[in-house]
Amino acid sequence: MGEPFVAVTSVPLDLQALTREVAGSCVGDGAVASFIGLVRDHNQGRRVSYLDYEAYEPLAVRTLGRIVDEVRSNWPDTRVGVHHRTGRIEIGDASVIIVAASPHRANAFAACRYTIERVKQIAPIWKHEHFEGGDVWLEGATADPDDESARQAAYRIACA
Amino acid sequence: MGEPFVAVTSVPLDLQALTREVAGSCVGDGAVASFIGLVRDHNQGRRVSYLDYEAYEPLAVRTLGRIVDEVRSNWPDTRVGVHHRTGRIEIGDASVIIVAASPHRANAFAACRYTIERVKQIAPIWKHEHFEGGDVWLEGATADPDDESARQAAYRIACA
Amino acid sequence: MRVTVRLFARLRDLAGSGELVRDIDGPATVHTVWKGLVAEMPALGDYERTMSVAVNADYSRMSASVSDGDEVAFLPPVSGG
Amino acid sequence: MRVTVRLFARLRDLAGSGELVRDIDGPATVHTVWKGLVAEMPALGDYERTMSVAVNADYSRMSASVSDGDEVAFLPPVSGG
């Protein structure tokens, strides 16, 4: 899709490769913060068997690219990459990986945290949870990239 | 030295292995935050050639173990691992890696940030910077693990 | 005019399909398309308050106009990450 | 009694060695050991306000007592990470 540092893919995620891509391009960066979201074995009292992630792929790629741009506008010295997996994901496997590189560790941490908050707010991706005895679509936030209050909430969580 | 999740070593650091060690042991953890400190090509206006890290190794291992215990006491649901490298480290290579795993991403991020702040405050490790035209020992904080105000400062930075 | 409707997650399950083709009398908005769908499948109606919409894989609004050949998507609240 | 003195980073460079063995008349504290070193090598003295100390690879205090065979370490301000 041409967006740098962004992917929506059904293959297992590779944090090492994304780290190399994001952090390898600038020897002035001393700090790399990363985040991995793993599928948990329980949720709201249910024993989860596995998750199936569905994405509106072209919009998801575009939205992750938008988040990357927001990070660059919030923290101009900081770059972030984010890969989200789709399809069936087993317990303990990664659904999302994020890497932020910066000369300053405060910015690397903030950019990484901001990115996961924004992914949860606006990425057009859904979890279909398969648990013992049934399955359910999880629904969180109404996605609205132009909602400034949501964006500010993510920023406050990242920087507070 | 027997401390879990802790190492002071002259061999290159392996984030993937530490992630597996820290995050692989519990399928209830949905969030993994990590930090890599990389050697930068400049510092305070000097063009850095490489860094040489010296450690008081047995005390450094013990101190990293102490930080791991502090994390567990601050965030009982969260585990952290930290490996610090010693000896000559080239530009762009990792001097320290930290991995925190938790059911909650807020705690994973906080534990990871707290750990790097505490490493900088109290780990008996020193950077010998070799730059174009000379070399210098860098000196930061007077290490005092019992200084509650330093510990609280690290906690505030991590959780604010 | 003819539009492609994309439905995701539970909306897709409720409709029994993730991709539908519908002919609509123009001029139309996203809301026109949605009203037509709900008339066919009333169970979708509950999502009107909480869903997002997209036109040609870009976030949009219910009031946005729709042209022949557009892809109009209706998105339940998201749960990625 | 005999103690092993460990010096690190710039303190090591100033002393020309990272490990020294010194005989001291007991009873002694870490401070006693330090005073002896500074008498030998006055350049070390500047570190008294900023350094940390350890006994047998555990952080300690200048007032801590020292026993025969102990390893006493003097640590400049740290810069790990």
Image (spheres, coloured by chain):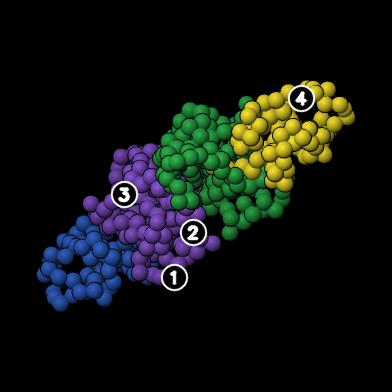
Chain colours: A green, B purple, C yellow, D blue
Discs 2 and 1 carry the same chain letter: yes
Looking at the rendered structure, the secondary structure element under dot 1 is helix
**Which residue matches tag 1?**
B149
Category of crowding for the residue at label 2, using alpha-carbon neighbours closer than 10 angstroms: few (below 14), some (14–19), many (at least 20) = many
Marks 3 and 1, Cα distance to the nearest angstrom?
Answer: 26 Å
- Kindly identify which numbered label has been placed on residue C22: 4
Marks 4 and 3, Cα distance to the nearest angstrom?
Answer: 59 Å
Image spot of residue A35 (x, y percent): 49, 44
- Kindly identify which numbered label has been placed on residue B93: none
Q: Amino acid at mark 3?
A: Phe
Residue located at (79% from left, 39% from top): C62
Image spot of residue D8 (x, y percent): 30, 56
Residue C48 lies in what quarter of the image?
top right
Residue located at (12% from left, 68% from top): D68
Category of crowding for the residue at label 3, using alpha-carbon neighbours closer than 10 angstroms: few (below 14), some (14–19), many (at least 20) = some
Residue B94 lies in what quarter of the image?
top left
Q: Amino acid at mark 1?
A: Ser
Q: Dividing the image into 4 quarters, which one contains the C terminus of chain A? A: bottom right
Instruction: Tell me: C10 left or right of B60.
Output: right
Looking at the rendered structure, the secondary structure element under dot 2 is helix
Instruction: Tell me: D65 left or right of A144.
Output: left
Observer-nearest residue: C44 or D79?
C44
Residue D60 lies in what quarter of the image?
bottom left
Of badges 2 and 1, nearer the viewer stands 2
Q: Amino acid at mark 2?
A: Ala
Discs 4 and 3 carry the same chain letter: no
